[in-house]
Amino acid sequence: MRQLEHGSIGTRLGEGLRESGTLGDDAMQRTLEAIATFVERARQHDARVSCIATSAVRRASNRESFAGRVAALTGADLHVLDGEAEAAASFDGATYGATPSATRIAVLDVGGGSTECAVGRDGLRDGAVSVEIGAVRLAERYPETTGGSVERARAAGLCARAAAAAALRPFAPLGPAGEVRAVGGTPLTLGAIAFESSADAVSGRTLTRREIDASIERMLGLDLAARRELPGMIAQRADILPAGAIILSEALRVLGCDAARLESNDLLLGYLLRTGPGRANA
């Protein structure tokens, strides 16, 4: 399999889902516009289109309506992955091409609405867990973490960490792991900030839990405008990044690990690897 392009557009599809139980009209429209962009790019490569959805869609009461709109736009059915399938795809993507080794690898995927962990050796999984906590959901639960009063943000950060620790307890039986790989926008953006680089340039580098916690403290000490100016920050993530970073830090703690390797190969690649090039090519 050869990758011709890789890109992402954050649309915050699950915005407000916690309160309403439905995907909002504005969020769906933003997402459909992003999908249209990627469909056009895929067709420029004469590639067929495959569509997947994760936590936000699988929790939404109007998921069938949204799936129909996606199918009408793309000509492809929308496959809604359950948590275990999402974890498995992230593992397959993050370990693709890894040198054969007896080391047990854990793959963490911190999303907007859920967080997954899958573990295994030599590309063979022996465990996978998905928990219903993600950067958007935790930030919406503790909105003071999104920027404002420093005192309130730091207090809310402590509450968010306690909530994350409780939600991530199901990961404990998956440890210990000799190596952790972290995928998704949260870890890559944290790496970009830590190394004053870009999210596209940090794959393969190692981020320690100490560096993650230092970034959390730094971000909670800034208002939203100042956060957006941090070198390496993706502006649209500035409000939810502290919450996502707290989840990543606590997941590493639960797994008994002090650091994670950042990996750009994620569930998108893993899904294509699992479905096969003959059935899903873009």
Image: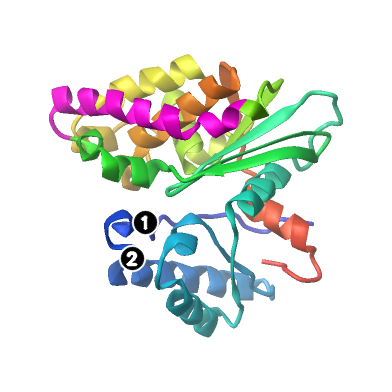
Q: In the image, residue 191 lies at what x, y percent?
A: 48, 29
Instruction: Look at the numbered discs 2 and 1 and tell me whether their residues touch, using CB distance below 8 Å.
Output: yes
| Figure check: 245 above or below 29 | above
Q: Is residue 197 left or right of residue 237?
A: right
Residue 158 falls inside the magenta stretch: yes
Q: Give the quadrant of the N terminus.
A: bottom right
Q: In the image, residue 110 lies at what x, y percent?
A: 50, 40
Residue 56, quarter of picture: bottom left
Q: CA distance from mark 2 to mark 1?
A: 6 Å
**Label 1 CA crowd tier, 10 Å (few <14, some 14–19, many 20+):** some
Q: Is residue 58 left or right of residue 97?
A: left
Q: Give the quadrant of the C terminus.
A: bottom right
**Label 2 CA crowd tier, 10 Å (few <14, some 14–19, many 20+):** some
Q: Give the residue at mark 2.
A: 27
Q: Amino acid at mark 2?
A: Ala
Q: Amino acid at mark 1?
A: Arg
| Figure check: 69 above or below 176 | below
Residue 278, quarter of picture: bottom right
Helix, strand or loop at disc 1?
A: loop
Going 30% across and 72% down the picture, which residue do you hit?
25
Q: Is residue 256 left or right of residue 196?
A: right
Going 85% across and 24% down the picture, which residue do you hit?
102
Q: How many dots with numbers?
A: 2
Residue 203, quarter of picture: top right
Q: Please, which colouring scheme is shown?
A: rainbow
Q: Give the residue at mark 1.
A: 12
Q: In the image, residue 51 lies at what x, y percent?
A: 59, 69
Q: In the image, residue 272 lies at what x, y percent?
A: 72, 59
Bounds of the magenta segment = 148-172
Of the pair 281 and 149, the residue shown nearer to us: 149
Going 76% across and 56% down the picture, which residue do you hit?
273
